Image: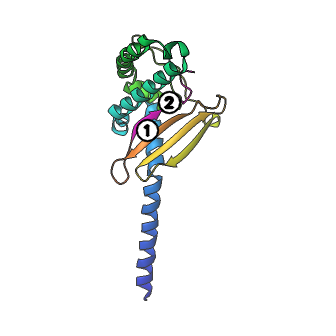
Amino acid sequence: MTRNNRILVGAGVVLAALLIAAYFVSPIIALHGLTTAAKAGDRAKLERGIDFPAVRESLKSQLKTVMTKSIAADPKLRDNPFAALGQMLLVGVIDKAVDAYATPDAIAEMVATNKAPEHISTDAPPPIEQPKPEPKAKSTTEAHYAYDGLNHFRATYRDKTDKPGDELGLVMERRGLFTWKLVKIELPPNLGH
């Protein structure tokens, strides 16, 4: 093998290694870009990085599960024949509440602060003038990253000062070779307790 051929083979190996590294690091870069856009209020970048209909549907599903579990855990409601009717009515209320609250600004706030809202109300959405919570200092937030297959990536955040179970998860989905979109916000498992 000539010197030029070795250089070409070496360059090819380095290029392949860089492409593989970029392939696996791309969700972290996308997540960092999304967080930066959320903190800066860059709405256009947020809209490119978030699949809003998918995020809203995942929030609706999680809140309906929380509601069903809380009804099943309460003996007074579990044995009440009107509880099922109330549950059916609440499903519509949850859908409307999530549609009202899961706005680009609210989702941006969750991404920027790595924190789920304390509660989602069925009242009118809060006025825009309300002060937004400051993002937590990086030193108080633990982040864990993991792939869920090749096309899904989960980032889980927990404030060291919060009680266990207050984690917020962000699930990214691959949309192309190096492009990722936020498709799900996983609320803390103990939400509503």
> Residue 49 in the image: x percent, y percent?
37, 39
> Residue 36 in the image: x percent, y percent?
47, 37
Q: Which mark is residue 34?
A: 1
Q: Indicate yes or no whether the magenta region holds residue 189.
A: yes
Q: Which residue occupies the extreme bottom position in the image?
A: 1
Please, what is the three-letter code of the amino acid marked with disc 1? Leu
Residue stretch in magenta:
182-193
| Residue located 54% across and 30% down the image | 189
Q: Say which quarter of the image contains residue 83.
A: top left
Of the pair 166 and 131, the residue shown nearer to us: 166
Q: Indicate yes or no whether the magenta region holds residue 139.
A: no
C-alpha separation, residue under disc 1 versus residue under disc 2: 18 Å
| Residue located 44% across and 79% down the image | 7
Please, what is the three-letter code of the amino acid marked with disc 2? Leu
Q: Say which quarter of the image contains residue 102.
A: top left
Of the pair 4 and 163, the residue shown nearer to us: 163
> Residue 111 in the image: x percent, y percent?
47, 32
Of discs 1 and 2, which sits in the foreground?
A: 2
Q: Eyeballing the image, is 31 above or below 109?
A: below
Q: Which residue is mark 2?
A: 187
Say whether marks 1 and 2 touch (CB < 8 Å): no
